[in-house]
């Protein structure tokens, strides 16, 4: 277990420990089932739990993991050549260990699958590129959608706000596949007027322009 002072927070530390074989097993299964490139390149993973310091009552003093100022469930990182040379695996996933046991097995799998999806194997055509240690070179895939949401702006400007436009675009583009619990069927837009349809298409196009569908070369 290791301790590291949390950036910008002088009064408490974050604690790290290695995940057990259960989490490694889940990652292995997900890679086999859904991440062919990671499997074929034999990418190895360091898996860590982060824990926040606790106060005198045993309550966490804050979130265990923070990314760009927001608490988050896990953070993915490509391990650099120097650390790989020390024997560290190719890619690292740090998980909020305080929240982990609160999640259902399905939620745990979804968190890990999300982080695995951030890793892309760099290739020359079909051939995976490798570093001097013959380990696979990786790059980070950015999210398809980044949603920055101010509820008060969405409330004040409603359909004119980027918040609502983006949310509508997500439902329009991914509604049937990602939100079946909303009951969006094929016939959903059947009764839509021409004007409403035109507005919807316009909003989706605007959201597409405002929402980079990222594929980072970095
Ligand atoms: Zn992510």
Image (cartoon, rainbow, N blue to C red):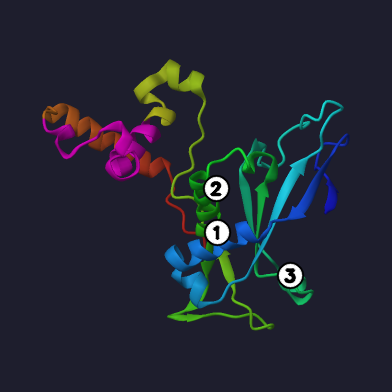
| Residues at discs 2 and 1 in contact (Cβ within 8 Å) | yes
Q: In which quarter of the image is residue 136?
A: bottom right
Closer to us: 151 or 179: 179
Closer to us: 19 or 206: 19
Is the C-beta of the residue carrying label 1 under 8 Å from the nearest atom of ligand 1?
A: no
Give the residue drawn at x 51%, y 70%.
Answer: 38
- The disc placed on residue 26 is 1
Q: How far apart are marks 2 and 3 (CA)?
A: 24 Å
Is 183 one of the magenta-colored residues?
Answer: yes
Q: Which of marks 2 and 1 is nearer the N terminus?
A: 1
Residue position marked by numbered label 2 in the rendering: 108
Q: Residue 79 location in percent, x, y?
A: 69, 66
Image height of 150 relative to 171, above or below: above
Residue position marked by numbered label 3 in the rendering: 88
Crowd tier of the residue under label 1, counting other residues whose Cα lies within 10 Å: few below 14, some 14–19, many 20 or above: some
| Residues at discs 2 and 3 in contact (Cβ within 8 Å) | no
Query: In the displayed structure, does residue 30 sit left or right of residue 5?
Result: left
Is 151 one of the magenta-colored residues?
Answer: no
Image quarter (top left, top right, bottom left or bottom right) of the N terminus = bottom right
Image height of 80 relative to 53, above or below: below
Q: Earlier in the sequence, mark 1 or mark 3?
A: 1
């Amino acid at each position: 277990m290791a301790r590291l002072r949390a950036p910008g927070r002088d009064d408490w530390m974050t604690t790290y420990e290695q995940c057990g074989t259960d989490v490694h097993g889940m990652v292995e299964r997900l890679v086999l089932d859904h991440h062919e490139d990671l499997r074929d390149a034999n990418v190895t993973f360091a898996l860590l739990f982060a824990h926040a310091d606790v106060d005198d009552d045993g309550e966490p003093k804050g979130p265990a993991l923070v990314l760009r100022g927001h608490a988050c469930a896990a953070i993915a990182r490509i391990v650099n050549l120097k650390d790989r040379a020390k024997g560290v695996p190719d890619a690292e996933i740090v998980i909020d260990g305080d929240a982990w046991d609160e999640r259902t097995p399905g939620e745990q799998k979804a968190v890990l699958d999300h982080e695995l999806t951030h890793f892309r194997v760099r290739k020359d055509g079909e051939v995976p590129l490798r570093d001097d240690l013959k380990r696979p070179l990786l790059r980070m895939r950015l999210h398809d959608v980044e949603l920055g949401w101010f509820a008060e702006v969405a409330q004040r400007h409603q359909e004119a706000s980027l918040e609502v436009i983006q949310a509508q675009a997500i439902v329009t583009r991914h509604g049937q596949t990602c939100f079946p619990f909303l009951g969006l069927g094929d016939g959903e837009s059947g009764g839509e007027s021409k004007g409403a349809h035109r507005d919807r298409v316009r909003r989706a196009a605007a959201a597409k322009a405002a929402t980079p569908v990222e594929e980072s070369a970095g």
